[in-house]
Image (cartoon, rainbow, N blue to C red):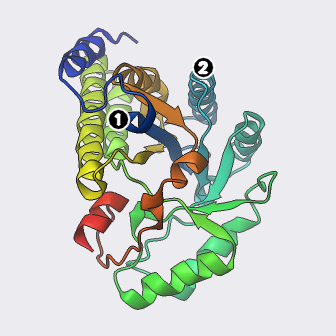
Amino acid sequence: MHFFKIAALLAAILILPVPGHGASGENQRKIAVTIDDLPTLGHGLLSPDEQTAYFTRILDILDKNGIKTIGFVTGHNLNRATRPLLDSFVARGHLLGNHTFAHSDLNDVSASEFMADILRIEKEIPANSDGRKFFRYPMLHHGNTLARKDSVALFLKDSGYVMVPVTIDNDDWRFNRDYVQTFKNGDIARAEEIAGEYIMHMAERTEYFDNLGRKITGRPVSHILLLHMNYLNARCLNQLLDYYKAAGWEFITPEEALADSIYLVPDNYISPRGVSLLERLQNR
């Protein structure tokens, strides 16, 4: 697959001045990559071999760029073909987290049902070597009532989970849906257009949330980027990471990002919307 259009779009993006570009020290822009919905998403269109191939390609790209991540496992994506991929993920030096078994929506189920879904998948996720446990809310829905939100948050704390929020939210899942369908239909030209639009979208979202973080804190924050383990990212991750490097970003681990004090600010946001931590803090 060719990426001439993506390269042209990327060049156009990098002409724009960005805060902190080329900076170092306290002004250095820092970002951690996290990946949801492991092991893989088949979309009803991809064979087990295709899913294994794109999973492996993403791991190879992360290795090439020296990036270590946390991958959040969804139980209903586990089967005989995909389960061994989790061991491959850990063998590459990455960490695993819990994303519930059924990708449950805390807006639609009770707190007790949601907590049961966390426990249902817990024993099927290979333990991290140091025993740390990580969790991410599906759809970034933390609960649409105070009771639901607080009940689950207390359960996670008591169960030893570190909740990993997202500061740079985006619609990679939507671009992936359109990309896979178009690619499988044989419309390669349109698939390339979607890939280019995706890179532009990610650049726009990154700059938006970086500026929002500065507005809230008065300084650069250590960001946590949400990606999904999907076909589109296997095709575009090289180009996406090239954008970040060219725009002056330093890749850090999720654990390093979580050391930023912004992740200690109380989150009092109650809403059915699933949004970035920065938007939660802005609207609390």
Give the quadrant of the N terminus: top left
Residue sitting nearer the eye, 180 or 25: 25
Mark 1 or mark 2, whichever is nearer to me: 2
Of the residues shown, which amino acid type is indicated by label 1?
Gln
| Residue 267's disc number | none
| Residue 64's disc number | 2
Label 1: how many Cα within 10 Å (few below 14, some 14–19, many 20+) = some
Quick check: can you spot residue 264?
yes
Which residue position is annotated with label 1?
Answer: 181
Give the quadrant of the C terminus: bottom left
- Badge 1 marks a residue whose secondary structure is helix
Task: Determine the residue located farthest toward the front in the rendered image.
Answer: 25
Q: Quadrant of residue 54?
A: top right
Please say if 257 is above or below 282: above
Would residue 19 appear left or right of 29 to someone viewing this image?
left
Whichever of callouts 1 and 2 sits on the residue coming sooner in the sequence is 2
The residue located at (32%, 59%) in the rendering is 278
Alpha carbon of mark 1 to alpha carbon of mark 2: how far? 28 Å
**Residue 142 position within the rendered picture, expressed as x and y whole percent measured from the top left:** 42, 73
